[in-house]
Image (spheres, rainbow, N blue to C red):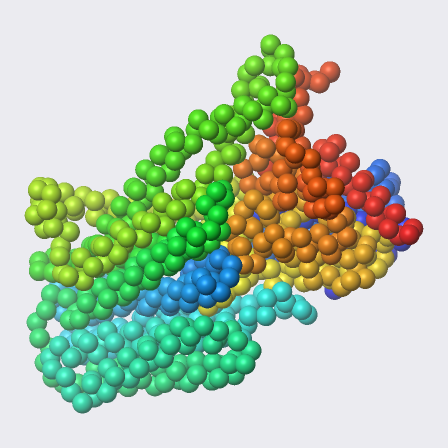
Amino acid sequence: MSEGPRRHRDEPARHDIVELRVHGVSGARPERVLDRTHVHQVAGDSSGGFHRQVPERQPGNIEPDGVTLEAYRWGDLPSGTVGRTLSLVLLLPFMLSNVAVWMRPVGRRGGPGVTVLCRLLALNLTALYVLSIAGVALDLLAWRCLGVARCPAPFTGMVELDGRQVGQRLAVLALLPVAAVVLLRLLGARRRRPVAHPLWAVEPLVGRLRAIHVATALAVLDLVLIEARSSGGRTTATTVLLALAGAVLLVCVGLLVVPGLLDGAGTARAATWSAGTVRVLAYGMSVATLAAVALDGRGWPPSPGLPGYGRIVGWAMLGQMALLVLLSGLVLWRYARGDRRSALPTGLGAAVMAALAVGLAGAFSSNLVYQTGQLLGGYQGEGGPPLPYQWTILAFFLHVTAGVVLGGAITLTSRRPRWRAARTITACDFPAPPPDAVEELHGVTRAIARARFTEWLGMLTVSYAALAVIGLTTGVLGLLGLEPDQLARSLFGLPAGSVGIGLTAGSYLTASVVLALLLGGILAYRTAWFRRHVGILWDLGTFWPRAAHPFAPPSYADRAVPELVDRITQLAERHAGVVLCGHSHGSVLLAIAVLRLPPEVRQRVALLTYGSPLGRLYARLFPAYLNQEVLRDVGERVGWRWLNLWRDTDPVGGWIFAAHRPGDPPPDATDPAGRVDRRLRDPRDLLAPPGEHRPPPIRGHQPGEADPEFRAAVRELAGRLRDQGRS
């Protein structure tokens, strides 16, 4: 890694300490991270690089604490351009399904099963994506618009296809779903700047998954065409093609179902060959299917919609919901057998994240078909939207409604115990508040009570995971051919059209979500304050590599962590030591970087984390990869030169090993982990200091690199490194 021509003027003597700061998901500018007006880049590129203050009067940027400041800015790696950000929005369900597989519980009894179910759900999302595009291209355009109805503008230019035979129309417009698969393939193949030693060695796995998903997408499209052509009677060609499509789907599912087949080193070669072979077979089968449908001159039976399409969608929706119920049942069973006292029970995140992915994917695909049909007038007269899509939109509306009700109920239920705990904390921090600080004390109590809502998310995740039954029920009803409005009239006596209101509301709600995501993606790129609020979704979602869905956005950690490792190694060779300072998600990047440092480098490294979610969130959300054992390993590798600063007003960060609140038992003197966490009173005081007009602000999750406690922690760690060098 080259530092540029100014490196020799920026590097101080070897006895100095470097303070390397890594920001969180807010994507702060290097000027803000360093709290300096003029900075310049000394390594990296425009997407992610290392910055220092421009040398002025103080040679080498040495601070009064005796350290040299440097910042690593990685905020543009997840979403540095508008195009990349919008692609993240479009691939959001795939990204969420990919994150779910990394949330699997620890152990062999549930972990492999969760991995298999998450990968099957991801495969189903790809199939549903293709089915929705096929619904627009084949059912609405080729069959309804060009067959029964008249195409409105701007589709009047397709009038040449209107006079063609039905099979030819289907074969030509089937190229639209094929193009959609190619688009996914191109987005999924987008690579970042290569590094020497990537963090995740998953590219071979991604290649196998990509081949499986492409083969499945083409097989599902072929199945739609073959089923439609078979409505006029099966022939030898359609029977053979139908058997081949089923065989391709079975092989793709089989490659995912066998635990360890795609990941194991011993089976890697066989898995790669099998995935590549089934993809080639899918290519050939698609060409044969298009030719068979286009050249078949037999008549087509009359039907308001594409024959067989609704049934295939119904089975896909039902399979999706059945997988989600199985996944939720598995993680809830693991939760019932584990520690239910945990604030965020380990393993439940997989079910919740998968439910979000399935809900968004189903709502997006259903609304695409529904709204396009309304635009084209394809649902006028006989035949409406396929029943599975109607039930899915209605289920999405019910899920959102139930989620809002659950969130509100848990907020109200937890309010009293949260405030009680917050009053206990403020009573210890401010035992004798002055009379004119009552309002400030109430504000601090309110901030702590709000921050402690994180401790109640476990109950919310359990409740939301159980909502998968709603989707399974609506999937069965759609497959049985029951219309929502008729069922509501017969069971509940609701007036005609009442369910249609919910269907319309769900459709507009889905459209609003899509619009909000698109606007959010643009504003997150162009507006710093907005990015601080929504950037967490992109930055955390794209941190994990593609182990479930190959069309999810690639992981930026593949570049960020190796860059950090290389830079830390260079700094440790030129200086007496390096104090690694990570805020929020930046502490996660640094913790993983420490695990990859060579032994000789770790001896000259200290770690300072603040606002860190490592213990409070990550150890519970990703228990198989960032658990307490891994965190202890991080501490041991840096010789327990590790301090973690946290505040009770912080809703994200917290303690890693021990809270150390007033009144807690003293830590075990023999356990070095007990000396890592240091609680900061927030705010430092309730009244304004002498000479100022306002009291100290509540910091919450803000970084606070200029705070006295932070500077004292840096000086302490720098002193430990200097003592280490002298010894």
Residue 426 on image: x %, y %: 59, 23
Residue 346 on image: x %, y %: 49, 51
Q: Which residue appears farthest toward the right when viewing the image?
A: 726
Asked if 579 appears above or below 678 in the picture, the reply is below
Query: What residue sits 54% from the left and 29% below the top?
Result: 448
Residue 544 on image: x %, y %: 54, 59
- Residue 189 visible? The answer is yes
Query: What residue sits 78% from the left and 36% below the top?
Result: 712
Q: Quadrant of residue 636?
A: bottom right
Q: State left or right for residue 343 relative to residue 44.
A: left
Q: Which residue appears farthest toward the top when viewing the image?
A: 435
Residue 542 on image: x %, y %: 52, 57
Asked if 196 appears above or below 16 in the picture, the reply is below
Q: State left or right for residue 429 relative to residue 422.
A: right
Query: What residue sits 84% from the left and 43% below the top?
Result: 719
Pick the quarter of the image with the N terminus.
bottom right
Query: What residue sits 18% from the left and 62% below the top?
Result: 479
Q: Looking at this view, is 115 or 49 the one in front?
A: 115
Q: How many marks?
A: 0
Q: Looking at this view, is 369 or 217 the one in front?
A: 217
Q: State left or right for residue 11 relative to residue 325.
A: right
- Residue 702 visible? The answer is no
